[in-house]
Image (cartoon, grey):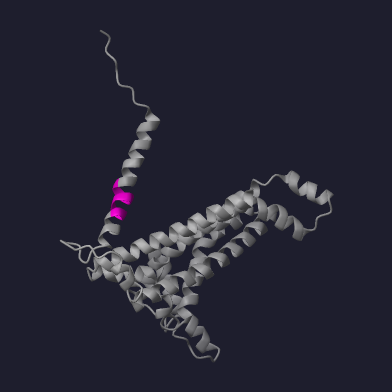
């Protein structure tokens, strides 16, 4: 009788390990969060259906965080994409020192958050360098981080930090566009405006969708910089969803925390699905 050895495909083993990690660290915690959002308390709680969701949409702090988060995404993502695409096109046309210019825009990605926060606080605190410069030229200083101007500061930080990442993605997409397309357009007499919209922008559609998704994800990460600069309760113009969830975690209000988490996951899922459908239709 021949012994049969059990053969395990290495590829299947790696996929299985990844699946186990996905279930343990993502799907299972989210399932628990969804279940807790339907209870009135985490321990021996009673099922209350959608009451937690209804109460959450009557919470002023949550509504303020939701509004500010959506506003920030709606402004930062398009602006960041336009600027990064513009920089990518300019660097693509540069003949000399292309790597040097690329490296300059990638430097913010490797600067630690603590050092970066120290730099921005040194600029925009009441006794910072910007107010010192305003006072030097005879103007009154601005309380940048305690007024609505804080939103513009955070927007500037977001663009400064993520411009290089998006730029590299666009440069990769531009590099993969066949040169024959541009040669054919030149033969047909297409101008620069037509070439950009009908060739460059159209061929960059898949990369543009990827940049949008990554920009939305990175826009949620801006909470780290806001928290390090202003703390748990910043000016109301930069009070984000993550502030609300972070404060609910510290107060052990798991119902509001898990409910807000489920809504956030739903919003991100709908955004990503819309972008994928847009990409498929654009490509077709």
Query: What secondary structure characterizes most of the magenta part?
Result: helix
Q: Residue 27 magenta-drawn?
A: yes
Q: Residue 178 magenta-drawn?
A: no
Q: Is residue 99 visible?
A: no
Residue beneath the point at 31% across and 66% down: 50
The percent position of residue 211, horizontal first and vertical second, equals 54, 56
Q: Is residue 121 left or right of residue 195?
A: left
Q: Is residue 197 visible?
A: yes
Q: Which residues are magenta?
A: 24-31
Q: How many marks?
A: 0
Q: Is residue 199 left or right of residue 245?
A: right
Of the pair 201 and 109, the residue shown nearer to us: 201
Residue beneath the point at 29% across and 66% down: 257
Of the pair 124 and 97, the residue shown nearer to us: 124
Please, which residue is most extreme toward the left here?
A: 44
The percent position of residue 237, horizontal first and vertical second, equals 43, 78
Residue beneath the point at 33% across and 74% down: 231
The percent position of residue 19, horizontal first and vertical second, equals 35, 41
């Amino acid at each position: 009788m021949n012994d049969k050895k059990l053969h395990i495909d290495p590829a299947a083993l790696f996929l299985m390990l990844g699946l186990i990690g996905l279930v343990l660290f993502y799907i299972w915690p989210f399932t628990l969060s969804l279940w807790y959002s339907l209870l009135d308390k985490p321990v021996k709680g009673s099922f209350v259906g959608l009451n937690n969701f209804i109460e959450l949409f009557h919470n002023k702090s949550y509504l303020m965080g939701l509004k500010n988060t959506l506003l920030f995404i709606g402004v930062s993502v398009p602006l960041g994409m336009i600027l990064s695409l513009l920089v990518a096109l300019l660097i693509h046309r540069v003949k000399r020192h292309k790597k040097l210019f690329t490296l300059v825009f990638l430097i913010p990605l490797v600067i630690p958050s603590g050092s970066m926060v120290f730099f921005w606080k040194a600029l925009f605190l009441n006794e910072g360098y910007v107010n010192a410069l305003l006072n030097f030229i005879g103007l009154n200083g601005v309380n940048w981080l305690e007024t609505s101007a804080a939103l513009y500061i955070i927007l500037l930080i977001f663009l400064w930090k993520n411009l290089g990442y998006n730029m590299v993605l666009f440069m990769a997409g531009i590099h993969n566009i066949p040169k024959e397309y541009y040669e054919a357009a030149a033969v047909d007499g297409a101008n620069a405006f037509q070439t950009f919209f009908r060739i460059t922008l159209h061929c960059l559609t898949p990369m543009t969708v990827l940049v949008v998704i990554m920009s939305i994800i990175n826009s949620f990460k801006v909470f780290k910089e806001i928290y390090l600069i202003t703390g748990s309760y910043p000016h109301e113009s930069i009070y984000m969803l993550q502030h609300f969830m972070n404060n609910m975690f510290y107060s052990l209000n798991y119902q509001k925390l898990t409910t807000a988490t489920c809504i956030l996951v739903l919003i991100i899922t709908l955004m990503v699905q819309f972008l994928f459908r847009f990409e498929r239709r654009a490509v077709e």
